[in-house]
Image (tube, rainbow, N blue to C red):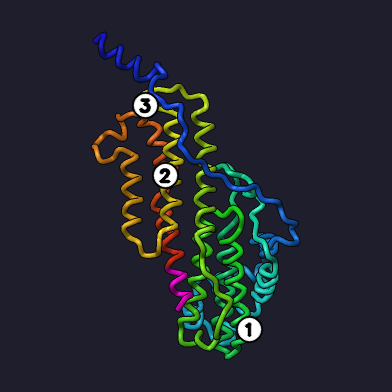
Amino acid sequence: MVGVIIILVTAFYLPIWDTPAPYGKTFSLDLSVPVDSSDNSYTYLPAKGERTKTEISALEVVRRGYATATKALTPTQLAQVIIDTESLVKKFKEAVTRDVYQCPSLLNQFNYDATPCDLGNLREMAALAIFHTEYHLGQGDVIRARALLNSALKLSRLVAYQDQPTYLDLLVSYAVIDSVLNILDSPGGRSVGELQTFQISTSSLSKAIIREYVSGRSLLTTKLAQSRTTYWLQPQRTQNLLTLHTDNELQFIERPCGDREAARVLEEQFLAAQFRPELGSAVIGPNAGGRILIELLVAARLAVTLKEGACAINERVAK
């Protein structure tokens, strides 16, 4: 019994387990200078609270998609939906004439308490532009359709290449690009011709990964600041694990597209660091508490998702 007590005291009260040496690398994002609202495409997007009842009703039709609308509505009713949302499309096109996209509430705010901007609104406005594109293609107005698709692509580029993108920013940007490419791949879309397409570079992916790292490091610093170093929870080793995972992700996204072996290795690195190969060691092993914290913070599979999404888009654009 005395031996058990000694082991417990050693494990939970003596600060002999942690390492004072930090991981050999660290990552950071530069602070961004806020742009004036008149230059920010985000502030020009029509906000949900500014919509009229007529626009809200018309957007309900848009959400169901153009194919559904053409089956459910008469040509006159469909034209009315276009008329009722024309003001929103005009504001959308005005927003993308700006050269910067910044989410004011997230700018230079690298913590999980920061309020995200409404990406649902951005996605809905892009979907509205696609809806109008399909309508105008059906009417034979290729010039207007091309302008709308270029506007949607411009918005996706602004979102993807902002200074401090989030994972969700990139996923929404990819979804918008996919919608545009789907139009171009359709029989009617082939008449649109060349658009101002672009390739997704690894720089936007790396910024999103580093942003997540900086936010995670801030949270860990706060959570671990008052923690006693024990066998079960070791602050410096925990910080090192987060940096290690980020380093592995940044190396992975630089790999060529289609490198499934690199994706598998990234997953194995994550699992190995969590001591999962040995049943139960993630709970009772050294620094188990820190490893559990890291497991909640690190989205190793999302790095793979972002890379594969960017590769898929780039391949479609190159065709």
Quarter where residue 37 is shown: bottom right
Return the residue nearer the eye: 116 or 213: 213
Looking at the rendered structure, the secondary structure element under dot 1 is helix
Total labels drawn: 3
Q: Would residue 12 appear left or right of 103 to someone viewing this image?
A: left
Looking at the rendered structure, the secondary structure element under dot 2 is helix
- Mark nearer the N terminus (2 vs 3): 3
What span is in magenta? 312-319
**Residue at position x 42%, y 19% in the image:** 15
Tell me the chief SS of the magenta region.
helix
- Mark 2–mark 1 Cα distance, whole angstroms, equals 46 Å
- Mark nearer the N terminus (2 vs 1): 1
Name the mark on residue 109.
none
- Mark 2–mark 3 Cα distance, whole angstroms, equals 20 Å
Kind of residue at badge 3 = Trp
Marks 2/3 in contact by CB < 8 Å: the verdict is: no
Mark nearer the viewer, 1 or 3: 3
- Position of residue 36 relative to residue 132, above or below, is above
